[in-house]
Amino acid sequence: MFDNLSEKLQRVFKNLRGEGKLTAENMESALREIRMALLEADVNFRVVKQLIENIKVKATGEEVLSALSPSQQVIKIVHEELIKILGSHESKLRFANESPTVFLIVGLQGSGKTTSTGKLARWLSKNGHRPQMVSVDVYRPAAREQLSVIGREIGQPVYPGAAEEKLPLDLARSARREAVNSGRDVLLVDTAGRLHIDDQLMTELQDLKGQLNPVEILFVADAMTGQDAVKSADEFHKRLGITGVILTKMDGDARGGAALSIRHVTGQPLKFVGVGEKFDALEPFHPDRAANRILGMGDILSFIEKAEEAIDKKQAFEMQRKLIENDFTLEDFRDQLRQIRKLGPLQNILGMMPKMGILKELKDAKVDEKEITHVVAIIDSMTPRERANHMIINGSRRRRIAKGSGTTVQEVNQLLKQYAQARKMMKSFSGGLLGRKMGKMKLPAGFPFGEMPKF
């Protein structure tokens, strides 16, 4: 997410810092590079123009040019202007005074509406709501069945519709009645899409809007389509009056042009971003956190929120005790890996880390999820005694473990060697003044010491 833009902007700021003194000339050169970086990231040209003008006005002032650290001042200004373009603050969902609140999910065919409807229903249920879904797409083969399958997978109800209900309006009205009768507080209406915007689609959506009076009309856009997504969002807004945007496939979009453009072009906020295929891979959009990631500052708040949601606190405290007391077994190592996996794809987690200091090399890190699978398989193939005491694992045991895990003896050796090195490191940490200090600290649940084996 924003990888290419982030890398180019960091290069610009590095060059500015290298200048020592900031002048009107090198500031103009920096602005030119920032403009090119934004355009290459597929940011809408009107957004780029506005952003550069705002930065130029603030950055060429006397107080910036004469500041003790002018390059840092420029970074601060760019950060502030990015947040403004992205929306200044998180735009939360609105809810009606009387249940059920109706959310109309709209967009072009193939943008991910049905999957996003399921993801949003799951998110709502995790945040204290009781959602119900209905598909009013009577045109696309198996569209309604697809939503039913999603509903079963996430454990949320879907109104199936009666045999005689052939029209979108009939389905929607019956679904709302069902939501009232079953005590559901939110009704998510998954609408039909087209490969392009046409009058028939808009007339149908306008009728649904008039009958259902939705509190939110959420436009689902595919981030990978860049400015086409922005253009479609703008046209839907002009015809329908959308209230927010869900941007899908953000994890696969290294440019980020759509995210940076949608709010400025449509005037409507980006409310959620899809960051993976799983149904928990939907996140509220925070403009300030997105600006931090663009400038290489990471997104530690989102990382902490994910960790708090996914990691068992009791298990984390027990792991803290074991680390301090140097009682960290191979079984504990495996359990830590399983906890980490709950946070989502590791490449996404690395993307939340600041790209500065000792962490700046993370931008080039490539994570192979299969490595974790191999490590877990190796440890699973050990007996409880072997996991508790790695010293008893001799040659014949290693051959048995390799065969049972579908790996090689060399891979088993590599894991045991790195585990032994990690224990040695922990032992040095657990002794002396540092150990005593660690005993008083609240250690976060995180990666175990040592590197992952490279299979």
Image (cartoon, helix red, strand yellow):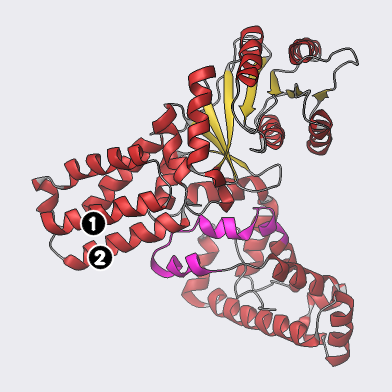
Q: Is residue 444 in sight in this rendering?
A: no
The residue lying toward the viewer, choosing from 413 and 188, is 188
Question: Would you call the spot at circle 2 few (<14 residues within 10 Å), some (14-19), or many (20 or more)?
Answer: some
Give the answer, above or below, for where 201 lies relative to 421: above
What are the residue bounds of the magenta stretch?
338-365
Residue 117's image quarter?
Answer: top right
Asked if residue 343 is among those painted magenta in the image, a careful observer would answer yes
Q: Is residue 240 above or below residue 271?
A: above
Q: Is residue 347 visible?
A: yes
Q: Earlier in the sequence, mark 2 or mark 1?
A: 2
- Determine the residue located farthest toward the bottom in the rendered image: 395
Q: Which residue is mark 1?
A: 30
In the rendered view, does 426 fall on the left or right side of 11?
right
Amino acid type, mark 1: Ala
Q: Position of residue 309 (x, y in %)?
A: 64, 45
Q: Nearer the viewer, residue 333 or 32?
A: 32
Q: Could you tell me how far apart the alpha carbons at marks 2 and 1 are, in whole angstroms?
A: 8 Å
Q: Nearer the viewer, residue 212 or 70?
A: 212
Q: Which residue is mark 2?
A: 15
